[in-house]
Image (cartoon, rainbow, N blue to C red):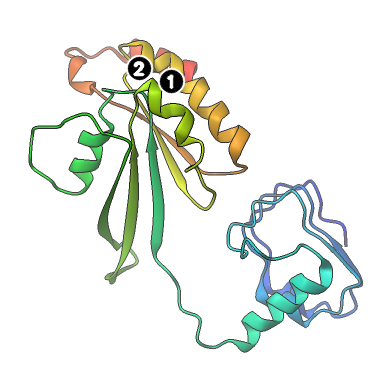
Amino acid sequence: LNLAHNRLDLLPESLGQMLALESVDLQFNQLNELPKQMGHLSLKVLSVEHNPLRKFPSSLSLQTEKILQYLKSLINDTSLVPSYRIKLMVVGDENVGKTSLIKHFCQDKKKDTIATDGIEIHSWSEALPSDPQKAVVFNTWDFAGQNIYQITHQFFLTGRSMFLIVFNPFDQSFSKIEYWLKSLEAKLEHVPVVFVATHADKLTYNNSGFVNSMTERVR
């Protein structure tokens, strides 16, 4: 079964019922995980290279036998519970409003904000829209934006994270977006990135043309 190069981000659980399969090629897709039901298959070849596979253990070998053993262990493990935790990494130049943004998330009403020295870690939670009794915990890494720190940040950029690239569209930090993207691309693959433009209060008039132009430049 050849499903390579199809931009798939999800596979049906019913794939585990196709017991006659001997080979499955899933290369060059957008899969974060495989359905555990595939552990029922007796495949000779299972190719999963060039997928994010964020939910796979980082130590797991991508050999067919090892993957099938891992999936089979998920079938037999009834103790697994979902983990609602997100590692949120906030990067950008200095004085663009990263710390102020995080304080807003954390509902910290202190107005005084000093420049971050190195890395500061914060945490806050939000109720799940689908189940208000459960909460998502955001562990947020606030990276100092000074040039002297930017080289050392490379050692802390890790996968299985969500990144916010924060910039001020009214100064030179806007031109640094490409730098931050290339820094992430050089270190990681297939990580979710959200662009956050700050200082919106400077838009004192309805200038949709400016906003559209800024959007096109980011693209």
**Image height of 110 relative to 2, above or below:** above
Residue located 50% across and 81% down the image: 80
Q: Residue at x 52, y 21 (%)?
A: 178
Q: Amino acid at mark 1?
A: Thr
Hey, what amino acid is under mark 2? Val
Looking at the rendered structure, the secondary structure element under dot 2 is helix
Q: Is residue 95 above or below residue 175?
A: below
Circle 2/circle 1 CB separation < 8 Å: yes
Q: Position of residue 77 (x, y in %)?
A: 58, 86
Q: Nearer the viewer, residue 217 or 150?
A: 150
Label 2 packing within 10 angstroms: few (<14), some (14-19), many (20+): few
Q: CA distance from mark 2 to mark 1?
A: 6 Å
| Foreground of the two, 153 or 74 | 153
Query: Which residue is depicted at the point 51% across and 22% down?
Result: 179
In the displayed structure, 154 sits above or below 172; it is below
107 horizontally vs 153: left or right = left
Residue where numbered disc 2 is placed: 211
**Residue 219 visible:** no
Q: Which residue is mark 1?
A: 215
